[in-house]
Amino acid sequence: MCLEVTPMKASHPMADIVILGAGVSGHTAALHLSRLLPKGHKVTVVSPNSQWNWIPSNIWVGVGKMTKKDVVFPLAPVYARKGIDFVQAKATSLWPRGDADDPRPAVEVEHTSDSRRGQTERIRYDYLVNATGPQLKFQMTQGLGPHGGHTVSVCTAEHAVDAAAALAETIATLKAGTPQTLVVGMGHGTCTCEGAAFEYVFNVDHELRQAGVRDRARLVYLTNEKELGDFGVGGMTFAESGFETTSELWTGSLFRERGVEAILGAHVDKVEPGVVHYETLDGTRHTLDFDFGMLLPPFGGVPLTAHDRDGSDITSELFAPSGFMKVDADYTAKPYEEWRAADWPKTYQAVGYDNIWAVGIAFAPPHQISRPHKSPNGTVIAPSPPRTGMPSGVMGKTAALSIVDRIKRGPSAPNHEASMANMGAACVASAGTGMRTGSAAAMTMMPVVPDYETYRTGRSLEDTRGEIGLSGHWVKLMLHYLFIHKAKGRLGWQFIPE
Amino acid sequence: MTIPTNEQQLTTPAGAEVADLSKAPMPTASTLKRRRSILFQLTRFAVFNARIMRMVHKGAH
């Protein structure tokens, strides 16, 4: 492998650091860089959105318990206060070896703000963090999604507002005495973020109960997971009351208690008005009539091309076919039984370039975490690995620390490391709101990527736990306020862990 | 290396479209009460946060 070493030029003693994306990972990287770098270095964030969104709380917007204003805030004032340049634009191409005009690496962007919409420019960088997040690929399933499709989504705050309105209509119909079927889940066999759909279905259940119409509603969770409790991480083993149990039974218990039906191992291939068409792992095809549908889309990498100085296309050097950026992972194709925790990236440095990192959803995972399956018809039904939330923030900080060391200590400074195979995560799936009436299924797992060479069950039984109760709701609410405080860069933000 | 797998418990019976959840354990009345008990849940809140912090330190981020 050829590594393109890009030392700081003598004529540019101060570094230009460009961060693509202002989600959890990109924003975290920007805040830490502005905190740790001496004055004079330039940190620029490029994001097509002018607002930061605490995505986990979109679930509450999606049931009308929060407004859009509660979960977003404008980025520009925060960046102005922190001395970070903000460019409202989407990145379209990378020029990691420079271009015909200038040997410095560059990223081409297209502005998205009202005042400069459509204008393009090339921004030069010494260090680049690709934190572009997901492309929501509703188009992979015909009729899926809120943009011309027949289902709603909670992926963005705007989507969640529409979802809440659709849910309110359904509840009104139920109150009028007409039974309704509500389906919540995954809109494609390769979706990720099953936790979000799980959380939404139980919030919907809670709302239906609060409205006194639960008995007239059929609530269905439609998922690509082969087993309940898989969550795209292959499920978990918990130690409870002196026994080992599975996240499948733990999750199944909540479904049974709340009367939520589950359709497992499903690949949705078409949505028509009021009808979901799907195939299950046994190869059979089915339809489900629905009145309200919230189905999440599959994710892909944000489309970016890469070019050599002469303009020739080198996209495949930097990106996997999925559009995610290749980093220091082991991408060798091998069977599930040979997957290792060590396959997962540690530094998130891009393949072949020591001044580019890809963090959060933007990096290409070496393989799924959950065992992938195919139906007899050859349809892939395999949850993609989640890499949002806590791990995303940690990766953003890790890239920032590597850049800071490189700038302060020179090009030989080693990268910081944070493998998902050595990183814990908490997943708090709200199952209803209210300081006294709320509930949540709260899980911790350590590590996210199971390590069967270190732990018999793949994860630490001490730290991999699941519990259901009111305290989970408090945790979720606390995280909402804490992370918005942190993202606003307010007093003590750096002491709040990622 | 053999990756251990747990046998699937909650399967979909042949011909059915939804999973059979009858093997999933139902919470007892005391479990449901504990899930809502303010005092008990305050303890769980502290324990859960302590666990998150322990994971953060173990992961050395």
Image (tube, coloured by chain):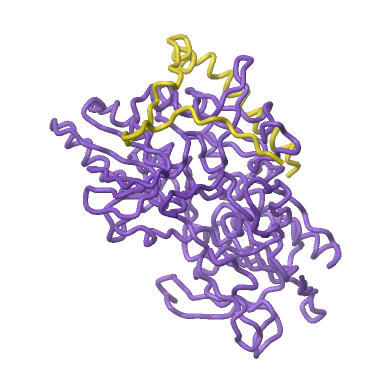
Chain colours: A purple, B yellow
A324 over A214 or under it: above or below: below
A210 over A158 or under it: above or below: above
> Residue A187: horizontal and vertical position, in percent?
38, 50
- Quarter that holds the C terminus of chain A: top right
Q: What's the residue at 51%, 40% (across, down)?
A: A231
Q: Nearer the viewer, residue B23 or A101?
A: B23
> Residue B26: horizontal and vertical position, in percent?
43, 17
Q: What's the residue at 40%, 71% (across, down)?
A: A114
A252 over A291 or under it: above or below: above
Query: Is residue A68 in sight in this rendering?
Result: no
Q: Is residue A104 left or right of residue B17?
A: right
> Residue A18: horizontal and vertical position, in percent?
64, 68
Q: What's the residue at 31%, 31% (across, down)?
A: A207
- Quarter that holds the N terminus of chain A: bottom right
> Residue A15: horizontal and vertical position, in percent?
74, 71
Query: Is residue A336 in sight in this rendering?
Result: yes
A358 over A475 or under it: above or below: below
Q: Nearer the viewer, residue B54 or B14?
A: B14
